[in-house]
Structures are given as C-alpha cells and as structure tokens.
Image: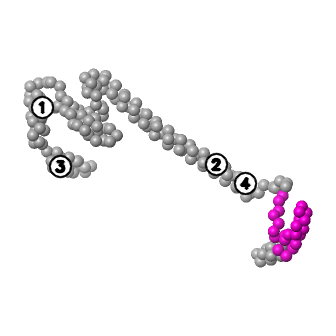
Amino acid sequence: MSDLVTTFQAFSGILVICPCCGELLRVSDLQFRFAGEFDQTVLDELRRRERGVEKGQEALERKIKQFEDGESALRSEAKKRGREQMRQLVRELDPGLARLQYDPKDIKVIGHPVDLVVFDGLNSDSGTVKNIIFVARNRSKSTKIARKTLAKAIETGQYLWETVTVGMDGKVVVQRTEK
C-alpha cells in the first residue's frame, strides 16, 4: 500500500506541458479522459442493475400511490351505492317504511311493543344520534296500552339505562348510567 502512496506523491513532482494550451502542470493535477469505449466490468453491470432497481422502485411507489388514491375513491363510491341499494331494498320490502326518510342503517327492528327504533344520525359522518324515534303500527289493544306505558315512562323520566356486556367467558357485566 505504501508503494501506491509513494507513486502518487511522485506524480506531484513530475511536471508536464499541456498539448492544448501549453500550460505547465503537475501529473497529479491532470484529469484524464478516454474517448474510446471501455470494456464492461462487473461494477458497470452492478450499477446498471442498481439503476434498473431504483427505476422499478419509483414505478412501484407511483403505482401504490395511484392504488391508494383510487381505493379511497372506490370505497366512497361503493358506500354510496350500498346505501342507495339499501334504501331501494327497504322500499321494496315495506313502502311505508321508505317514507320515514331515515337512513335504513339507523333503523333497528324491535318487534314489541314498538316495531322499530330509529337512532337518527347514528350512521352519519359525525355518528351523533340526534333523536331516538319509536315507530309503531296500530295493532291490538294490549300493544297500544304497552306503548302508552312506555311513552309515559319516557316522559316522566322513570327509566334506567344499563349496558350489559357478555364476555367470551360468559361473564356478564352490567354498567348503569345515571341520569
């Protein structure tokens, strides 16, 4: 290794005259250029492949970005189509229900003493329930009495809100919310 260093140091002591401009230069200051073609080496091949991999990576990143942009647009459009299909299905199943003008996903079937409960706004972007609507068709006299009792309990605040959670192990947890 010291022979190489000694050789480069010796180049600084060798002076040459530039054939183009006639300037006096040291050999160590020269910048050599080769006008012909070089034989391809392993290093040249590795660099060529590296450039190819970099271009492929850039193309892949562009495709991923395009996919992500397109995916969100497709999901948004699919949600709109799904909601419209749900509304159409509700109209077909029960034309009277379609007149309620609520998001079908906000409507939950109870059965008795009311037919449906609408959590207005539950599936909106904000997820905030604006109103809870009880929907009931006129039925028997006993059902009407049960509904009146329910309405009176709500009006007078004589109800209790409890959340009951059943775990995978079967354990039941009751959480009471005070008014």
Q: What kind of residue is marked 1?
A: Arg
Callout 4 crowding tier (Cα within 10 Å): few <14, some 14–19, many ≥20 = few
Left or right of residue 153: residue 72: right
Q: Residue 137: image x %, image y %?
A: 17, 25
Disc 4 secondary structure class: helix
Which residue position holds label 2? 55
Magenta-highlighted residues: 12-34
State the residue at coordinates (38%, 31%).
82
Residue 25 part of the magenta segment: yes
Q: Is residue 150 left or right of residue 13?
A: left
Determine whether label 3 and label 4 are within 8 Å by CB.
no
Q: Which mark is residue 96?
A: none
Q: Is residue 112 above or below residue 162?
A: above
- The answer for how far apart the CA atoms under marks 3 and 2 are is 60 Å
Callouts 1 and 4 close, C-beta under 8 Å: no
Disc assigned to residue 45: 4
Residue 60 sits inside the magenta stretch: no
Q: Residues within 10 Å of mark 2 (few under 14, many from 20)?
A: few
The residue to which callout 3 is attached is 177
Mark 1–mark 3 Cα distance, whole angstroms, equals: 24 Å
What is the distance, in whole Å, between disc 1 and disc 4 at their CAs? 83 Å
